[in-house]
Amino acid sequence: MSRFYIFISVLFFACQNQTVLPSFSGAVNEVVVVADDNIWESKEADTLRLSLSAEVEGLAWKEPTFDVIQIPKVAFSRFFQTHRNIIIIQKAEQSKIAFKPKLFSQNQWMCVIEYRTKKELQQLLNQYVPVITYEIQQKEKSRFLSSSVGLTPSAPAKDKFGLSLRLPKEFSLALDTNNFVWYQYSPKDLELIKGVFAYSFALDGSLSSKAILSARDSLLKQFVQGQVDGSYMTTEYLYAPFVSTFENEGTTTFNTKGLWKMENAFMGGPFVSYAFQDSTRNRAIVIEGFLFNPGVDKRNALQELSWIISEAKIQQ
């Protein structure tokens, strides 16, 4: 009996010492900035303010990278403390920046920026703003992927291109050919299309943005045709695509963001793709997500497609 009593007592006090945090609040890509107005609106905070509100690349109209809610420190009540993404700017005896300090809610992201003088605040922001925006985006990606239950592997993408591509279960196979695979989600009650392409094309030399866009237009004209005779998907060059590169496991990956349109028809929207060279077979492999969702903001939906396809890897 005494052992049982001791066990219950230990369990009770252990539970007392463990604080169960509430779930986070707020919408995807929403950031609460806790800073007094004279600091937030100052030139020293320009770098952070402009970076958070920077225009998303590859969209037909302007949408900010993040939706910012700025409040003064006195308004930082419990209502805001559980928010998913929080940046706190406050005066202190030493200038420093800290990520993920004591958190107020589960799976929350927080950054505390402390400054001694406005000049030192500006120096801190100039140095760390790229890190801050990257960290928030990675946290949002992590939340999305961890909550996306039911992602299923694509057998055609693996068999044809060696891609370990996993898609939400609501996506269905629309086309499967030798060098082009097309998945799509298009609910009957919504004017919405989310599509994913995986395709390859022969390479004579090194991979380039020109080769990627040329092959894209050629393959989409062949395989993605509209309901109107003579209509097909192609790249909209009135808005030049944004192309960047990065190294991924020793391979240069091309990330393209742009707009697509239906030639000879009235449809269009944004797309994002990742392309990399398969040197063993003298070919390039492209994984692409596209969106058709007229009349509504597209940042979040396109970002989710980008997160999904960015996880695709070539299996050696």
Image: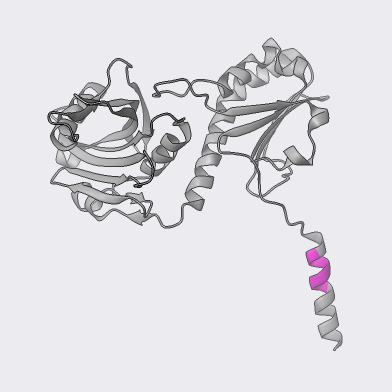
Can residue 207 be seen here?
no
Quadrant placement of the N terminus: bottom right
Q: Is residue 229 above or below residue 3?
A: above
In-image side of 91 versus 173 (left or right): right
Residue 77 figure quarter: top right
Of residues 113 and 37, the one nearer the viewer is: 37
Q: Residue at x 78, y 33 (%)?
A: 76
- Overall secondary structure of the magenta section: helix
Residue at the extreme front: 189
Can residue 185 be seen here?
yes
Q: Residue at x 46, y 52 (%)?
A: 148
In-image side of 254 versus 114 (left or right): left
Q: Which residues are magenta?
A: 10-15
The number of numbered badges drawn on the structure is 0
Residue 73 part of the magenta segment: no
Residue at the extreme bottom: 1
Residue 296 figure quarter: top left
x and y, in percent, of residue 173 in the image: 25, 51
Q: Is residue 102 above or below residue 118?
A: below
Of residues 276 and 187, the one nearer the viewer is: 187
In-image side of 53 versus 169 (left or right): right
Q: Look at the image and name its color scheme.
A: one colour
x and y, in percent, of residue 59 in the image: 40, 24
In-image side of 1 versus 234 (left or right): right
Q: Residue at x 27, y 35 (%)?
A: 276
x and y, in percent, of residue 36 in the image: 78, 21
Q: Is residue 51 above or below residue 86?
A: above
x and y, in percent, of residue 23 in the image: 66, 50
